[in-house]
Amino acid sequence: MRLVTLSAPDDFDAWRDAARGLIADSVPPEDVVWQVGGETDDLFAATATPRHDPVGPAFKVPRAFLDLARSAILNRDPERFALLYTLLARLRREPKLVEDQADPLVRRLETLAKHVRRDIHKMRAFLRFREVTNDSGSRYVAWFEPEHHILRANAAFFVNRFASMRWSILTPEVSLHWDGAGLSEGPGATKADAPDGDPIEEVWKTYYASIFNPARVKVGAMLKEMPRKYWKNMPETALVPELLANAQARESGMIAKARTAPGGNSEVAWEALREEAMGCTRCHLYKNATQTVFGEGPVSASIMFVGEQPGDQEDLAGHPFVGPAGQVFDRALGEAGIDRATTYVTNAVKHFKFEPRGKRRIHAKPDAGEIEACRWWIEQEQMLVRPKVTVALGATAARSLFGKVMTISRERGRAQALPGDGGEAWITVHPSYLLRLPDEAARTTEFARFVEDLKLAKAAAA
Ligand code: URA
């Protein structure tokens, strides 16, 4: 039996070094006991000093495994080290195993990694600093209770975003302190160690108010999106009664403020919105998808394209329209003279819905409930981007934008007013429809019609 002791629960480098040594020694997974610090003691275990110079035939670990392992290791599940080592050992014989979404071990580790990613995004979206002033000046302190061991992995995000401030993030297990130049660690804390009171970031309130849609207030839904344990920490929730009281005026005023305030607040608001969407659990689709695929493009775009939902490749890459349908879309945009980089591209449904078939994940159409649950995000994106023209690519997008079933053949080729003050919409086919056409002649004709529709939208946005 080998005992491997890692110095910290998120110590990926130590796990990797130990795992390399064990693989080189051909130690089977069932002969390894993993522990952190002195957290467990197996009296029968012989301490292993992992070897750092692997012997035996070179074994190239796929990049996808390392990405998976880096995230999964941060999960609180005590079995994670052993599960990862088991996968690593199997990879030697089955080099493509990480791609096999049907394999129970791969699926379990993907789920661990997914929960970690969601926790990382929640921390980015829901952490709030409050100012503390003493003799040595101001420091900004935030309290957060992560579900997994994500604090160190998330540090760079907060350093980059708040580089010029001195701040501390307190969690029950460890604290991080940034002094403007370097990062240091301290012991865990309690909520009582963090200050109460107003947050420093007016922008959060501005953002929150800017996306507050009084017509759709559902406190239950808001709480679901913003879990209760974060909710009580978030000052903007105190705004809700006020927002409800002044709903209409405040809504339009604050959106205008978010869009026009110096410092590009609409970009900050968009980023915050995206971060929130990364933790979305509004419908069940998040459970099987790899990640939320949010919209992309400048918030100043005058055209917004709305597709159906991410496909297999988009789900893995985290970006909309990068797979086969995306290639058709890009080619059509090129022929229509539209630079994709100037447009905002998103989907009606932000998680990939699929049926597993063997090793493949087959696209499944989102149903009305899933489209409805995801409409909230599209509405926020529309409020922030305010495109002059929105193009619905296919029936799902049209249903989401108009809130009812639209027949593409009937509505195609002319401008339509979107509900509310949503601007003008054009409805056309989805690029994957072109991929499914059986014969070459039909594909050519329909592709040309699609390009014509895009040209109409471009002219309308000009
Ligand atoms: N199909 C879509 O509707 N959206 C994507 O992002 C990819 C394929």
Image: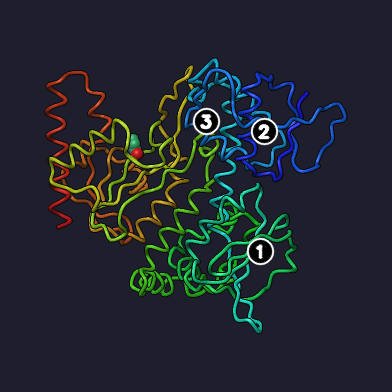
**Which is nearer the N-term, disc 2 or disc 1?**
2
Residue 241 image point, x, y percent: 57, 71
**Which is nearer the N-term, disc 1 or disc 3?**
3
Q: Which residue is mark 3?
A: 65
Which numbered mark, 2 or 1, is in the foreground of this view? 2
Give the residue drawn at x 49%, y 25%. 60
In the image: residue 409, left or right of residue 217:
left
- Label 3: how many Cα within 10 Å (few below 14, some 14–19, many 20+): some
Q: Which residue is mark 2?
A: 81
Q: Between residues 209 and 264, which one lies in front from this camera angle? A: 264
In the image: residue 69, left or right of residue 305:
right
Label 2, ligand 1: CB separation under 8 Å = no
Q: Name the image quarter holding the N terminus.
A: top right
Distance from disc 1 to disc 3, alpha carbons, whole Å, reads 33 Å
Element assignment for label 1: strand
In the image: residue 77, left or right of residue 339:
right
Q: Amino acid at mark 1?
A: Trp
Label count reads 3
Above or below, 174 relative to 444: below
Above or below, 81 relative to 102: below
Q: Amino acid at mark 2?
A: Phe
